[in-house]
Image: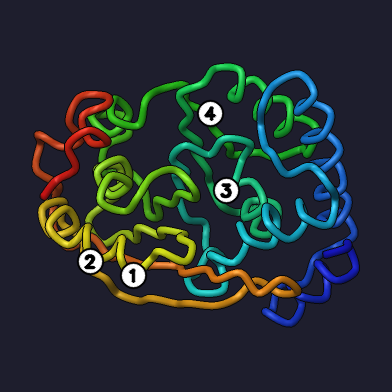
Amino acid sequence: MNEEQFIQALQEKGIQLSDKQVSQFRTYFDLLVEWNEKMNLTAITDKPSVYLKHFYDSISAAFFTDFTKEATVCDVGAGAGFPSIPLKICFPDLRVTIVDSLNKRITFLHELADQLGLDNVQFVHARAEEFGQNPAYREQYDIVTARAVARLSVLAELCVPALKVGGRFVAMKGAAAEDELADAKKALETLGVVLEDKHTFSLPLEASERTVFVFTKHKKTPKKYPRKPGTPNKTPIQ
């Protein structure tokens, strides 16, 4: 996907990029490639793939849930900033908090936000399990999202505790989405979210399958969740 195709594909979804936003995506790509030589941020570094599999794919969450308001968004395990930084570029009013366990990735994200001129972006160096138990962040966010972090039964425990009651947990998944959903049934119930919407689509040009699940939080998450670091992955809620 070249830049022109990227702009056009977003336009078809009702997202019109300004010259400034187009320039921000160019800078993002340049910084990603530059920093990737110093640290492992992504295996995908060729421009057409970055624009399709990182930028467009991240923004696809906004095709199915509303990011246009001044919402507080938490991105768990964002790595090189996906999906929250592309969403923030498209929707500048978002107030974004990014959580990542690796400090050098946080360093990259600070530099990225500076170079892109982004405001209302906060970076937290923490394990998601610790973040979710911290009273400063617990049940504070309108939207919590994650992409390529863990299977849904684990991901829910890492994300839902940070979500306000009435907020939305947006999980971005690949081809195994249905199996993950079935496997996560007990976890989702225990943590207090219900499936509001499910959208399956194909990425343009290469047709790989994606699913975006949108869950709504209807009750507070029990205090014991998330459990201590590493536990959700070793023993998911069953």
- Name the spot of residue 4 as percent of width and height, x first: 90, 68
**3D distance between C-alphas at marks 4 and 1:** 32 Å
Q: Which residue is mark 2?
A: 182
SS category of the residue bearing label 4: strand
Q: Which residue is mark 4?
A: 123
Question: In which quadrant of the rendered image does the N terminus lie?
Answer: bottom right
Q: Which residue is mark 1?
A: 178
Q: Which residue is mark 3?
A: 84
SS category of the residue bearing label 3: helix
Q: Amino acid at mark 1?
A: Glu
Q: Amino acid at mark 3?
A: Ser
Q: Does residue 88 appear left or right of residue 123 in this picture?
A: right
- Name the spot of residue 158 as percent of width and height, x first: 30, 40
Q: Amino acid at mark 2?
A: Ala
User: Which numbered disc, 2 or 3, marks the residue that appears first in the sequence?
Assistant: 3
User: Which numbered disc, 4 or 2, marks the residue that appears first in the sequence?
Assistant: 4
**Residues under numbered marks 2 and 3 in contact, where contact means CB atoms less than 8 Å apart:** no
**Residues under numbered marks 4 and 2 in contact, where contact means CB atoms less than 8 Å apart:** no
Quarter of the image for residue 60 reads bottom right
**Residues under numbered marks 1 and 2 in contact, where contact means CB atoms less than 8 Å apart:** yes
**3D distance between C-alphas at marks 4 and 3:** 11 Å
**3D distance between C-alphas at marks 2 and 3:** 26 Å
Quarter of the image for residue 136 reads top left
Q: Does residue 196 appear left or right of residue 101 in this picture?
A: left
- Counting other residues with Cα less than 10 Å from the Cα at mark 2, is it few (<14), some (14-19), or many (20 or more)? few
- Counting other residues with Cα less than 10 Å from the Cα at mark 1, is it few (<14), some (14-19), or many (20 or more)? some
Q: Nearer the viewer, mark 3 or mark 1?
A: 1
Front residue of this view, candidates 48 and 66: 48
User: Which numbered disc, 3 or 1, marks the residue that appears first in the sequence?
Assistant: 3
SS category of the residue bearing label 2: helix
Which residue lies at the image location 33% right of the left edge and 29% below the top edge? 131
